[in-house]
Image (tube, coloured by chain):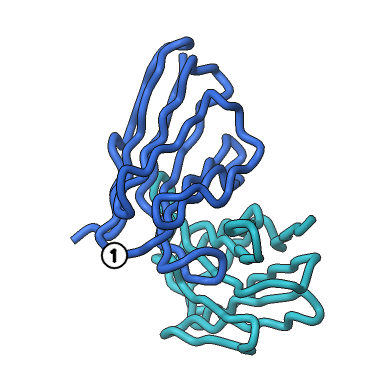
Amino acid sequence: KQEVTQIPAALSVPEGENLVLNCSFTDSAIYNLQWFRQDPGKGLTSLLLIQSSQREQTSGRLNASLDKSSGRSTLYIAASQPGDSATYLCAVSQAGTALIFGKGTTLSVSS
Amino acid sequence: DTAVSQTPKYLVTQMGNDKSIKCEQNLGHDTMYWYKQDSKKFLKIMFSYNNKELIINETVPNRFSPKSPDKAHLNLHINSLELGDSAVYFCASSLGPYSYEQYFGPGTRLTVT
């Protein structure tokens, strides 16, 4: 049974720092991995989708990598800003089921 | 234009009542989903429909019944509500099942008193 783990559970950084959020999964038979952002009381915003055949995806200050064989993904946020404060969720897709989520990393960026 | 919309945004009701949550997507997607986010913020799939047919049905009490009148709509009806049903329910859609990017609605916060 697929399990998705995100470390750390919470992270506080000063504005301007570069940071890395980690996601690991136990079954490498995935179609893709998706990173989401969730603001308090809001829905999920898709940030990046990495197909299983890809190694990384970039969008603005965000870069996500995928190492399927080792069951790991990282989300790199460059030059963090207070507006980046949110919960970041990692999810994988597999045959026969929908997205399987980690429990998220809650990021706080102070000015 | 809202891609995936849900109504209502908030729902407060008493134990034993029956309630429905509606979801609509204007993305032209074939696949729609219902997820539940519990009090610990953990998201889990409940159901998925592809072209109006049920393709995923996780271990969910049969008090929960999804209905897809057409590809753009997926509603969730809950009978005999219990305290443990209190959660945020998210609707999502994708171009197709399993391997496609999913887009989420804003969520419906259900509180059962």
For this orientation, the residue located farthest to the left is: B1
Give the residue displayed 60% in from the left and 63% down from the top. A91
Residue B21 point in image, percent of width and height: 35, 34
Q: Residue at x 79, y 55 (%)?
A: A1
The percent coordinates of residue A40 (x first, y second) are 43, 48
Q: Point out residue A12 in the picture as x, y percentages from the top left corner.
A: 59, 62
Left or right of B20 on screen, residue B59: right
The color chain B is rendered in: blue
Q: Residue at x 69, y 61 (%)?
A: A6
Q: Quadrant of residue A84?
A: bottom left
Q: Amino acid at mark 1?
A: Leu
Pick the residue in front: A76 or B89: B89
Whether residue A12 is situated above or below residue B32 in the rendered picture: below
**Chain identifier for the cyan-coloured part of the image:** A
For the question of whether residue A38 can be seen, the reply is yes
Asked whether A6 or B3 is in front, the reply is B3
Q: Is B38 placed above or below A8 here?
A: above
Q: Where is mark 1, residue-wise?
A: B27
